[in-house]
Image (cartoon, helix red, strand yellow):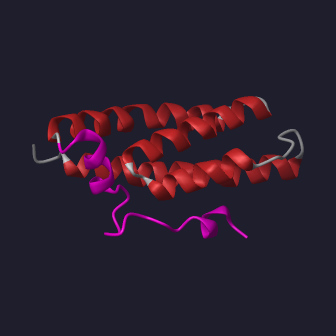
Amino acid sequence: MPIQAHATREASSGEPIDRSYLARFTLGNAALEREILELFAAQMPLYVAQLRTAANSKAWMLAAHTIKGSALAVGAQRLADLAQRAERLDVDAASADGQHIRQQAADAVAEASSAVCGHIACLFATD
């Protein structure tokens, strides 16, 4: 079963980020919210690259854990769910099956990350 099938929760509005969740932590400060989201969008491609290039299980789990924590901090629940599933993978990357499973997980995380970052770009495109 594809990894994507297990992570379908998104913000109740169907958006990739739960802005009301984030607003609780920024106390409604729109400038702070924007700064956090822009930092998230700038860092996420680096974290996804770390996941894709992880040379061992420890590096893989650290990259997945970083993505999960970052996603949870901004209310990107679907991305956090996918990163958590990736973090829990216990496969040998040296085996062909292990490489395939990790590739599927990294692809799913990258796709969700791209959706969140694209959403962030759209939020602030008119500013």
- Work out whether 110 lies above or below 43: below
Q: Residue furthest right?
A: 95
Q: Residue at x 33, y 63 (%)?
A: 15
Q: Quadrant of residue 48?
A: top right
Identify the image quadrant of the C terminus: top left
- Judging depth in this view, the residue of 91 and 69 nearest the camera is 69
3 vs 107: above or below: below
Q: Is residue 20 magenta?
A: yes
> Which quarter of the figure has residue 54?
top right
Count of marks, rendered view: 0
Which residue occupies the foreground of this view, 8 or 47?
A: 8
- The magenta region covers 1-28
- The structure residue drawn at horizontal position 73% and vertical position 70%, both measured from the top left corner, is 1
The image shows residue 97 at horizontal and vertical percentages of: 86, 53
Q: Residue furthest left?
A: 127
Residue drawn 53% across and 34% down?
A: 47
Left or right? Give the position of 65 relative to 114.
Answer: right
| Magenta segment includes 88 | no
- Residue 7's quadrant in the figure? bottom right
Q: Position of residue 83 (x, y in %)?
A: 59, 48
Please state the horizontal and vertical placement of residue 87, each as a whole percent of the image. 68, 45
Compare residues 79 and 108 and report the one nearer the observer.
79
Residue 121: image location, x then y, percent = 26, 46
